[in-house]
Image (cartoon, rainbow, N blue to C red):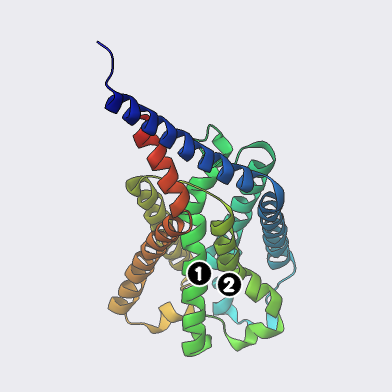
Amino acid sequence: MGKSKKQVREFNAAKEAVEATKAQLNTCNDAYTSGAFKYLRFLVHLLAAAQFSYGIYFHYFRVHWPTDLLDEDELKARWGGKFKYLTFLDVILQAIYHSLALLNDLFGDNNVSGDSKSMLRSVRDYVFAAFAFPVAHNVCLSFWVIYVWDRELIFPSALDAIFPSWLNHVVHTNVALLAIMDLFTCFRRYPSRLAGITGNVSFILLYIIWLHIVRYFSGEWVYPILEVLPAYLRYVFLALLVGFNLVCYLLGEFANNVVWGPEFKLLNQQKLKQG
């Protein structure tokens, strides 16, 4: 039994809609993976990877505590070295992330349409979502809020003589700014909420455990603010650190959905029409 004219019209209309959606996606994909946008994304990752790598080198090898600023008790606080600071761990994380993103630009894919089969891209997207974006904003916002309130609690003025201003901005400001630039230049699908939050919370909880290990062996808290707070407020502060890191994760997920909303809408339309 042949199809009615109405069924034929509906079939042709559905086919045309699928083709139109596919054409829109191809246009988005071509604009995103070639031309100026491609080079902008590559430049962001190249400059970020180079900047953070140099920041790690300078921070670790060229920034030294003057011996005349330290007494015997303060010397104990050097247990764990610079790896006890979330700022230093974060700049390492940012260097790793942007290096992964740079490798993906060279050897992986940045396609908008379809599901990526690049392992580099999958790892890049998860590291950004669970770690790089939320930790960068946690470090940036918490540092500058406490700095404005009372800088001696987070970055004593004695450090000005040994910690260059440009390095301070690399590790406390640029980490967040470059994460935002990456958000606008890299199309990505966030992991499932459970997978992303599990990685995010696990990272910050492991850091808090590390803080307590340093405290146990050195006899000093890493940050002066933890010394001046009474015990109950200290753990309120650490709980807020976990909570704020989670908020930064959700903020990144929300921002990604807003920035890439039109592309997600086209992909969903394509799936519905093909299904």
Q: Nearer the viewer, residue 131 or 259?
A: 259
Residue 154 in sight in this render: yes
Disc with the residue nearer the chain's start (1 vs 2): 1
Q: Amino acid at mark 2?
A: His
Q: Residue furthest front?
A: 5
Distance between the Cα atoms at labels 1 and 2? 6 Å
> Which label belongs to residue 87?
none
Query: CB under 8 Å between callouts 1 and 2?
Result: yes
Q: Nearer the viewer, residue 266 or 142?
A: 266
Residue at figure coordinates x 70%, y 41% from the top left: 106
Is 5 situated left or right of 28 in this image? left
Q: Residue furthest top?
A: 1
Mark 2 Cα within 10 Å, few/some/many (few <14, many 20+)?
Answer: many
Question: For mark 2, what is the residue?
Answer: 172
Q: Amino acid at mark 1?
A: Val
Give the quadrant of the C terminus: top left
Can you give x and y, in whole percent of width and height, for residue 241 in the image? 38, 69
Q: Nearer the viewer, residue 246 or 177?
A: 177
Can you give x and y, in whole percent of width and height, for residue 80 in the image? 55, 62
Residue at figure coordinates x 65%, y 70% from the top left: 170
Q: Helix or strand or loop: what does disc 2 sit on? A: helix
Residue at figure coordinates x 56%, y 78% from the top left: 74
Mark 1 Cα within 10 Å, few/some/many (few <14, many 20+)?
Answer: many
Above or below residue 90? Residue 21 is above
Question: For mark 1, what is the residue?
Answer: 139
Quadrant of residue 5 within the rendered picture: top left
